[in-house]
Image: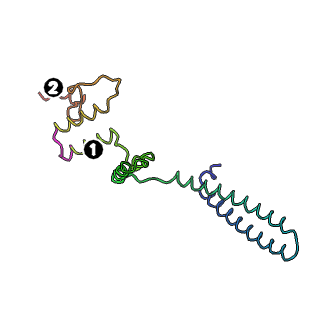
Amino acid sequence: MNWMRDNRLLLLFAAVVLTTLGAVGLGIVGVVATVGALLGGGAVVQTVAGFLLGTLLLVGVDIVFSVALVRALARRASVPKSQRVADGLARLEAVVPPLASFSLSDVFAPPEPTVEERHEALTRRYVEGELSEAEYERELRTLLDEDEDPGREPQDAAGIETDLSRTTATDAEYEPARE
């Protein structure tokens, strides 16, 4: 069963190709048989009905496999994220209100960065010298305030430890020795 799941797209594609070829082939054989029945004086209605029913059945199965293949491909497709495209679609949705129901701008918008990603970017900016220590701590407090749980009571600015002001146990142990 794992093999079938792993090769689902290939199997669906093969099924679409085979049912399409079968429907076309059965249709051609049906036309030849009908012409033969007309020229030979056979039962034309029975010949046409049999081949037409078989062809329609194969076309129906082909449509089912085609829809399944397109659906499987659409699930695997990834939509590229771009803020520029999202902004353009948002403007278009504002101009053409019926488009807003599709919310395409949300589909193309990149995800909001997580608190961890924003903290890493803030630390990187500080390390590269873009921010002073005071600016870094202020922005870090803002970031921590945004991340707070609503049920938790807020910390005051003095209670927030940053990477710069945090002391480790080893620092505290060696502090008296330096004096």
Q: Nearer the viewer, residue 42 or 96?
A: 96
Comparing 78 with 118, the one in front is: 78
Q: Residue 126: x, y in percent?
A: 20, 43
**Mark 2 belongs to which amino acid?**
Pro
Q: Which residue is mark 2?
A: 176
- Which corner quadrant of the image does residue 57 belong to? bottom right
> Above or below — where is 17 with respect to 144?
below
Question: How many neighbours does mark 2 have within 10 angstroms: few (below 14), some (14-19), or many (20 or more)?
Answer: few
Which residue is farthest left? Answer: 179
Q: Is residue 175 left or right of residue 7?
A: left
Q: Horizontal placement of 66 versus 44: left or right?
A: left
Q: Secondary structure at mark 1?
A: helix
**Tag 2 secondary structure:** helix
User: Residue lying farthest bottom?
Assistant: 39
Tell me the residue at 32%/32% (across/down).
147
Looking at the rendering, the stretch of residues picked out in magenta corresponds to 126-133
Picture coordinates of residue 89, whole percent (x, y): 37, 52
- Please report the residue visible at 74 percent of the width from the left and 71 percent of the height from the top: 28
Quadrant showing the C terminus: top left
Which residue is painted at 45% across and 47% down in the image?
102
Residue 121's label in the rendered image is: 1
Q: Nearer the viewer, residue 44 or 120?
A: 44
Q: Position of residue 44 (x, y in %)?
A: 84, 69
Kind of residue at badge 1: Ala
Are discs 2 and 1 less than 8 Å apart at CB? no
What separation in Å lies between label 2 and label 1 (alpha carbons)? 36 Å
Compared with 40, 176 (above or below) is above
| Disc number placed over residue 35 in the picture, else none | none
Indicate yes or no whether the magenta region holds residue 131.
yes
Is 82 covered by the magenta stretch? no
Question: N-terminal of the two: label 2 or label 1?
Answer: 1
Dominant SS in magenta: loop
